[in-house]
Amino acid sequence: MEEGKREAKHKRAERLNNLEEKDLEKWAALDFARQNKLWIDDFYYLGKIPMRGGYENTLVLNEETGIIFKSNNLANSEYLISNLFKGIAIHNLLFPANNYEFVGFTGLDNGPTRTPYVEPVFKQKYVAEATKAEPSEIKTYMESLGFEQRTPESYYNGQYLVSDLHPRNVLKDSEGNFHVVDAMCRTL
Amino acid sequence: MSKKSRMSKLTETQRAKIQAYLNNYRKNHGINSQYLNEAHRKSEEAKGKYLASLNPSEIDWKKEKERQNINARND
């Protein structure tokens, strides 16, 4: 019983530390964005056309430049900005033709006493005239890159785990090229 | 150690960490030097050329929106 209590207390302390870490990252991001003019007051100013996003991204398209902007709510990154940046760096390494470029941070500055709400914003070239790849095509494509399928949507190459490869995240253009436009990438 | 001083110490660490990520990110957002293999490099080059060849002013955005809706329905 005592052991259980100690464990629960330890878990509570750990949770607090994680919360602190998340908050501190947000404060640091806001501070950094303000200092470097990377704070985006209005995300919808970047593109006029809202697009359909997944669970973690809000998307707008700038049709003049063919650039899609993604504001990430960190839901798939354990709410840590650093986790997202790690994943994005791996995505850019594995899929450089569909790389993400960091644009800045957006959200709510809640003043000096309350933690700000922060979402990192990235941009990516829009793949026009594309259709969703079939699961079998995704498997063949990932295998051609040296990955092995682990679950229907995740692949591993001995170093990187790439998951969330649903058909909506892998597009096939009119030339027959595959584009991984959104994936969860991490080192394993 | 008070919570305030502990927080400020961590803030510095986190700030440095994020700054390093961002600096690295700016430098590497166009990473093209590391490829898994030759086939991957060629495939990425082909995709890069295809994307660069797209002229946004010639894209039918209305059709694109319809395509997106159809894709979403098929999900």
Image (cartoon, rainbow, N blue to C red):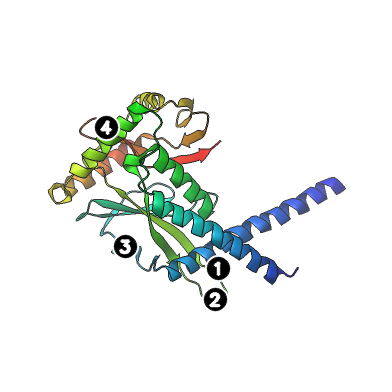
Return the x and y of residue A113 as percentages of the image width and height. Answer: 57, 75
Residue A130 falls left or right of residue A148: left
> Callout 3: helix, strand or loop?
helix
Residue occupied by mark 3? A44
Residue occupied by mark 1? A115
Question: Looking at the rendering, which quadrant does residue A44 occupy?
Answer: bottom left
Residue neighbourhood size for the residue with mark 3, other residues' Cα within 10 Å, grouped as few (<14), some (14–19), many (≥20): some
Which residue is at the front of the view, A53 or A35? A35
- Residue A54, compared with residue A121, is above or below; it is above
The answer for which chain carries disc 4 is A
> Callout 4: helix, strand or loop?
loop
Return the residue found at the far front.
B33
Return the residue found at the far right.
A2
Q: In the image, what residue type sits under mark 4? A: Asn
Return the residue found at the far bottom.
A112
- Same-subunit check for callouts 3 and 4: yes
Q: In the image, what residue type sits under mark 3? A: Tyr
The C terminus of chain A sits in image quarter: top right
- Same-subunit check for callouts 1 and 2: yes
Q: Do the residues under discs 3 and 1 have CB atoms within 8 angstroms? A: no
Q: Which label belongs to residue A177?
A: 4
Residue A70 falls left or right of residue B9: left
Residue neighbourhood size for the residue with mark 2, other residues' Cα within 10 Å, grouped as few (<14), some (14–19), many (≥20): few
Q: Do the residues under discs 4 and 1 have CB atoms within 8 angstroms? A: no
The answer for which chain carries disc 3 is A
Residue occupied by mark 2? A112
